[in-house]
Structures are given as C-alpha cells and as structure tokens.
Amino acid sequence: MMKLRLITILSAMTLSIAAFAQATADDVLALTRKANDYFMNKYEDPTVPTNVKKIRPSSLWTRAVYYEGLMALNDIDPQARYIDYTDRWADFHKWTPRNGVKTTDADDQCCSQTYLMRYAQTRDERMLKPTLENLDLQMQTKIGWWTWIDAIQMAMPVYMQAYQLTGETKYRDHGMKMYRWSRNECGGGLFNTKGDLLWWRDADFVPPYKEPDGKDCYWSRGNGWVYAALVRCMNQLSPKKDKKVYRELLKDFRLMTKGIASCQREDGFWNPSLVSTNYAMPETSGTALFLYGLCWGMNNGYLKAADYRQMADRAWQALVTVVHPNGFLGWMQGTGKDPSAGQPLSYDRIPDFEDYGTGCFLLGATEYYKLLSKIK
C-alpha cells in the first residue's frame, strides 16, 4: 500500500511538472485575450451604468480596476480597440474622478489611474487636469483617510503617477503619509509585521477578531490590493531618485511576499481567508493579484526565481482552470470586505460585478506573460 501511494504521488508530481513546462507565453496571451474578449463583448458599451441593486456610473472602482488590467494587456498586445474602448469610457466621464473633483473617497479616485496612464501616452491635458485638481483638494483636508486596505490600491498609485508626471514631490509625500497611517496607526496598524506578514482589512478585523477556527482573518483580495498597489507605486518611482521611499515600499513588498508564500494552497490558489480553514476554497481575484506581484518581483530582480517561480507557475495553472470556454471567469468572489462576501463561490457562479475580477486576472496574466517571455 505504501509503495502504491508513493508511486501515485510521484506520478502526480511528474504530471504537475509537465503541466508547468507546457505553459508558453503564447498560451498565456491566448487565454488572456479570451477572458478580455468575453468582457468586452458582454459590456460592449463602456458608458452604460452598472445596475447591481442600484444604478452606478461606469466610472466606479469596480470598472476602474478592469481598465488597469486592460491597459496592462495593451502593453503586451497593443490593439486599437483596447484604446478606443478605454477612451470612449474616459471621454464619457470627462476624465474626472467618480463623484467629481471634490471627492475624497479613494474608491472614486481609482479611475484616475487609467486617465493618467492615457495622459502619459498622449500628453492631452484634459486627461490630467481633473485628477490633479482632485488630489490638490484632497491634500487640503483630513477627510478621506485610507481606513480600509482596498483604498491603498484604489488611490495610492494615483498620487505616485501624479508625482511622476509633474515632478511635484507633494503628491508622492502625501501618498506615503496616507499609506503609513494605514500601515502603522489605523486600528493600531493594519500590517501585521510581527506575525503573519499580512494585512487586516480594516480596524474591525484586528485582534481580538478571529475566524471560527481561531485564526486571524486576512482577506485574500484585500491583501492582493495592497500587494498590487506596492507594485504599481514602485513602477512610478525611481530606485535612485526616490531611494528612501522606494526602499520602504520594496521592504514591505518583500515582507508581504513571505506572508503570501506561506499560505498558498496545494492546488495553486489562495483561500478567501488566507490562513484560516474557514471558507477554504479556490478564489480567483486574490490569486491573480498575488501572481501579478510575484511575477513583477521576479521580472525586476527583487525575488529569486529559485524561490518563487514554481509558486507562480502553480498559481497560473490554477487560474487556467477558472476560465470557461467562452472566457467567463469562475471562482470569483463578489464585492464585499471579508472572506464571507459573495459566498458560496463556485466555478459557475456569476459574481455581482464581473469587471474588477477580470481586471485582476489581466494584471496577473500579463505579468506572467512577461516572465515567460524572458525565458523563451
């Protein structure tokens, strides 16, 4: 019996290694296009408001995250239709944060990431001015602190983009001020640097809050938001000119990587609740964001492939299994703020919003494509 079990395990390992070897950059791109085409075909008019329980403009954060992914896809697979789709959306919203330039809500500011990416490509001032006006107003008020970790992804990259595009350090410095407050002060500090090296979603989830099995509650997608934000912010900074800030973010990125690495599932996914057995199941959005960060770290020489390449390969193989023949993405957790949101998850269940999940998938897939392209 023991011999048979050993043979079975070795056979499974051999098949697993073979599956990893079969992944090519072309394979990744084809699957990424399929997922994106499904979304663009289903939501053909990007100006149409969403209607999930109530009407919301298509500049809300869920759609804004999709465009982050679409712009990443366009970087590796340039197509005029991607840019046309983006510009139709942004033009309709007048390149302005959701709820106008006076908003201090990080979720409202997320769309500005894409606006500023397009400005960097075109230098069209109408793509820049509303965002700068919004940030300048935000910096004059104490309203709008990032009390939830999702906000770090929604807004912090916008500040770093504004700094990179204008050269004005006030944007970088304010973004770091907000980040440090969330990290070190909100709820006693949302980043558990002395324990699991993961982030509590907000002050409601810091100890003594526990999952039913007694473990701390670290929400997968929430940690994915922070991990992605660190990447997106460092992409806007110079390791030399912004040495102190860059090193600070890179240190947190590496710490998070250790925490994330410690709780990947055998099947390559991460649970909705990272270290807990509560809601132990595949989840696509967090897994895709972790793949994004892991691959970026290896692509930029900050993580050793010997330590993390297999983890990225396993994550990609997991994500391959969520893509339906028509491009729909399964095992996607709906909107919320903790592992219980949108349950029960499944391969077939359609989440309340499909856009941000597609964006997360595109981010992870495109960075994995870059990793594979280096070794072709």
Image (cartoon, rainbow, N blue to C red):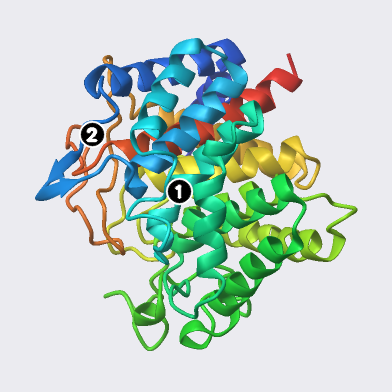
Q: Return the disc, 2 or 1, that comes first in the chain's sequence.
A: 1
Looking at the image, do the residues carrying marks 2 and 1 touch, with CB atoms under 8 Å apart? no
Q: Determine whether, in the image, residue 35 is placed left or right of residue 28.
A: left
Q: Position of residue 247 (x, y in %)?
A: 80, 62
Crowding near the residue tagged with mark 1, few <14, some 14–19, many ≥20 C-alpha atoms within 10 Å: some
Q: Determine whether, in the image, residue 293 is placed left or right of residue 307.
A: left
Residue 344 numbered mark, or none:
none
Q: How many marks?
A: 2
Determine if residue 7 is in view.
no
Q: Position of residue 286 (x, y in %)?
A: 43, 48
To which quarter of the image does residue 205 belong? Answer: bottom left
- Quadrant of the rendering where the N terminus is positioned: top left
Q: Nearer the viewer, residue 172 or 91?
A: 91
Residue 347 numbered mark, or none:
2
| Disc 1 target residue | 265
Residue type at the position of mark 2: Tyr
Q: Nearer the viewer, mark 2 or mark 1?
A: 2
Q: Nearer the viewer, residue 84 or 154?
A: 84
Residue at figure coordinates x 27%, y 16% from the top left: 41
Residue at figure coordinates x 57%, y 64% from the top left: 136
Q: Position of residue 64 (x, y in %)?
A: 40, 42
Look at the numbered disc 1 and give the secondary structure of its residue.
loop
Does 309 sit above or below residue 80? Answer: below
Q: Determine whether, in the image, residue 112 is placed left or right of residue 174.
A: left
Crowding near the residue tagged with mark 2, few <14, some 14–19, many ≥20 C-alpha atoms within 10 Å: some
Residue type at the position of mark 1: Arg
Look at the numbered disc 2 and give the secondary structure of its residue.
loop
Q: Mark 2 and mark 1: span between their CA atoms? A: 17 Å
Does 171 sit above or below residue 91? Answer: below
Determine if residue 201 is in view.
yes
